[in-house]
Amino acid sequence: IGYGLLTSRFLSDLCKCDLHKLEEGPPLQAVLTREEGLQYYRTMQTIRRMELKADQLYKQKIIRGFCHLYDGQEACAVGIETGINLSDHLITAYRAHGYTLTRGGTVREIMAELTGRRGGIAKGKGGSMHMYTKHFYGGNGIVGAQVPLGAGVALACKYLGNNEICVCLYGDGAANQGQIFETYNMASLWKLPCIFICENNKYGMGTSVERAAASTDYYKRGDFIPGLRLDGMDVLCVREATKFAAEHCRSGKGPILMELQTYRYHGHSMSDPGVSYRTREEIQEVRSKSDPISMLKDRMLSNNMASVEELKEIDVEVRKEIEDAAQFATTDPEPPLDDLCNHIFYNDPPMEVRGTNPWTKLKSVS
Amino acid sequence: MYMYYGITMVFFTVFWVCHIYIYINNMTLFIFYHVSYQNVTPFLCIIIALHSVEYHVLPCDICIINCILLLQVTVRDALNQAMDEELERDERVFLLGEEVAQYDGAYKVSRGLWKKYGDKRIIDTPITEMGFAGIAVGAAMAGLRPICEFMTFNFSMQAIDQVINSAAKTYYMSAGRQSVPIVFRGPNGASAGVAAQHSQCFAAWYGHCPGLKVVSPWSAEDARGLLKSAIRDDNPVVFLENELMYGVPFEMSEESQSKDFLIPIGKAKIERQGNHITVVSHSRMVSLCLDAAAVLAKEGIECEVINMRTIRPLDAEAIETSVMKTNHLITVEGGWPQFGVGGEILARIMEGPAFNYLDAPAVRVTGVDIPMPYAKILEDNSVPQIKDIIFSVKKTLNA
C-alpha cells in the first residue's frame, strides 16, 4: 500500500475552452501535484460539507433569512483561488460562503455569521450575504452591483501600481444587468486589470438562461472584451483559465471575461426547493457525471496520486471541522445589544443614535 | 518715479478694472477690482499713487500695493481650490465624473485640475452613472479616496443603489472591516429654467439614510471648509452644492485661506444673530433668509438666521439653543415639503427640550409640492421667495 508507490505529479488533459476575440487560450494540459490535489480536494469537500450543514441548520430555523448555497459549484471558488494570489482581490454576489472560505475566512466564522452570533465574521451584523475578509469585498446582495465595485477595485490596483488584479464574479441572471455593460465599457476603455467571471449555473433563481437571455453565450457578451468559456466543474480547468486570465490582466492588456459552466444542487436559496423549474433527473445526472469533487477524486485515484483511505481520512477530518464549527455557531452568544449602533462611521468620535422612541438614545462608536 | 508709476498702472489695467479713484491732497487713491482669471482669486486692492510731480520720494514709497483688505471668492473657485489642495495633499484622492477633465467641469468647478494633475487623477467618465458610481465606491473600498461628481444630483438617482447599498451600509454590514472613504458631489436642487427632471432637491432622500454624511454648503467659506472635511472624512459623504450659488462671490477670512482650513461636518452656523425668531435654512435659501431678515429688521423684527451647513448629522442642538432664546421657529428649504428637511427639524423640536419654549407652532417654508415647471413666472412661484419668508415670519410672530 505505502504512500511511496503513489505518483507525485501528473500531467492532466484539460477541456478545450471556447474563445472569443482571443488567438490562444489556456494550455490544454496542466500538471497536478499530489499536494495540490489533496488541497483542492480538502477545500472543495469543506465547502460542500459546510453548505450541507448550513442546509440542516436552516431547516432547524437556526439560520434565518437568506441562505444561498454553493454546493455543486465548489470547483469554481477553489479553482479561481488557486489561479490568483491572496494579495489579489475578489468580489462576488450573494452565493458567497465558498469564496469567504477560499479568501481566508474560517468555517467557524462563516457558520457563526450565518447563525448571527458575535463570533461571526461580521460579528453577526451582516449575515449570509455580507461576509468580508482581507481583499474580499463580499458578499453583495444587490444583483449586479458588485460588478462595478470590482472594476473600481481593479482601478485602485492600476492606480497604485501594485500589480494586483481583481476577480469580479456574477451569475447568469446578473449577466443581463445594465450596470455590467457600463462596467465592461469603462474597464475596457481604461484597461482595468479585472477578470469578469460569469458563473453560469443555468438558472437565475427560477428562470432558465434560455428564458432570460437573448444570447446565452455569456463569454461573448463583453463584446470588445476577450472571453473564454470552460467547464466550471473541473477544478484544474478553472485554475488554468484563471492563471491565463490573470496573466492577461497583469500584462496590462485590460479586462478579460470568463464563463464557467457550472451547476448548483440546491435551489436558488433555501426558500426555493429547486425542482419546480428543473427536473430531479437533471440534478441527479449532474451529480453522477459531473460532480466536481468526484471528478477530482477519480482523477487522483486513477492516476495513483492518492489512496482511497487517504481521501476518506480527509473526509473524516472535514466532517469533524464542520461539526466543531456548527457546535460553535449554535452555542456562541448573539451579539450584545450595545453593539447595535456601532460601526456606522469609521474613525469618528462616539455619537448618539436615536432609538425607537425619542427618549431612547443609543451609543455608537466606530 | 513716473515710469514706475506708469508700469504699475499698465500691469494693473490688464488684469484689473479700476472702479473708482479719489483724489486726496496730493495723492490719488485708485481702487481696483480684480477680474477673475483662471484660478487667480479676485481681491480688492488699494493703490496709493502719487499724483503730484513735486513730490520726491523713492519708488518703493510711491506705489504701495496695500495689504489685501478683502478677499472675495466665488463658491465655484472655493470648491476648485479645495479640491486642488486636497489632490495635492493626498495622492490617493482623485476626481471622476462626466466632463470633469478636458471640459473643465460642466459648471467649471474642476477648471484647471486636469491640466495640473492629468488623466490618472482627473477622469472623464462615459454617461453611465450607475457604473462609474460603483467603480468609485469599489476604488474607495480598495484604498483610494475618490471624489465622484454627479453632473447634477438628479442623475444620482440612476446610481442611488451604489450610494446607499454599496457605500453607506458597508461599514455597518461588515462590522467595521470595510470602510468607504468617498465623496459624492454635484449641484443639487432647483436651478433656472431647467424644469422638472433637473430640479429636484435630494437633501431629504440622502439625509434619511444611516451610514451617510450629507452636507449642504451655502457660502464660499462653507464650500471650501466643508469640501475639505468631506474629502478627509473616512466615510461616504454626499456633498450637495447649488448651481445658482457657483458664481456668487463671498468674503473669505484670512483664516479660511489656510490649506488646513476645515469646517467640521455636523455643526451649524449662526449667520445672523437675533432675538425674535429662529430661521433655519441650508444652501441657497440662506441668502434669501438673510435678505428677508434685513427687510424685517427695518420693522424691528430681529431674525436669528441659522445656516445648517450639514443635513446629516443634523445639528439639532444649535437649533434648540436658538429656539430656547427666540421662542419662534421657521425652517426654509428649496425642496418639497413632504417628508423633508423641515419636517425632520420640526419633529426634533417637538421631541426635544425646545418644545416648551415655543410660543407658536413651528412651520416650514418649502418649495411648492409640484414638479418644477418651466415658464419663468411658474418657476418663480414654485420656490420660496423673500416675501414668503417674510410672510411666514410675521404669521408665526403674530400667531
Image (cartoon, coloured by chain):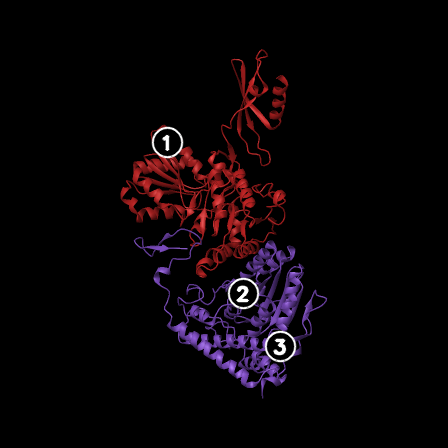
Chain colours: A purple, B red
Q: Which residue is pictured at 58% across the width and 26% down the height?
A: B17
The one nearer the camera, A253 or A283, is: A253
* Dot 3 and dot 2 residues touching (CB under 8 Å): no
Chain to which the residue tagged by mark 3 belongs: A
Chain to which the residue tagged by mark 1 belongs: B
Residue A92: mark: 2
Label 1: how many residues lie within 10 Å, few (<14), some (14-19) or many (20+)? some
Residue B284: mark: none
Q: Which residue is pictured at 37% across the width and 31% down the height?
A: B296
Vertical side of A267 occupied by A131: above or below: above
Label 3: how many residues lie within 10 Å, few (<14), some (14-19) or many (20+)? some
Residue A33: mark: 3
Vertical side of B288 occupied by B129: above or below: below
* Dot 3 and dot 1 residues touching (CB under 8 Å): no
| Helix, strand or loop status at disc 3 | strand
- Location of residue A317 in the rendering, given as x and y in whole percent from the top left corner: 49, 79
Residue B296: mark: 1
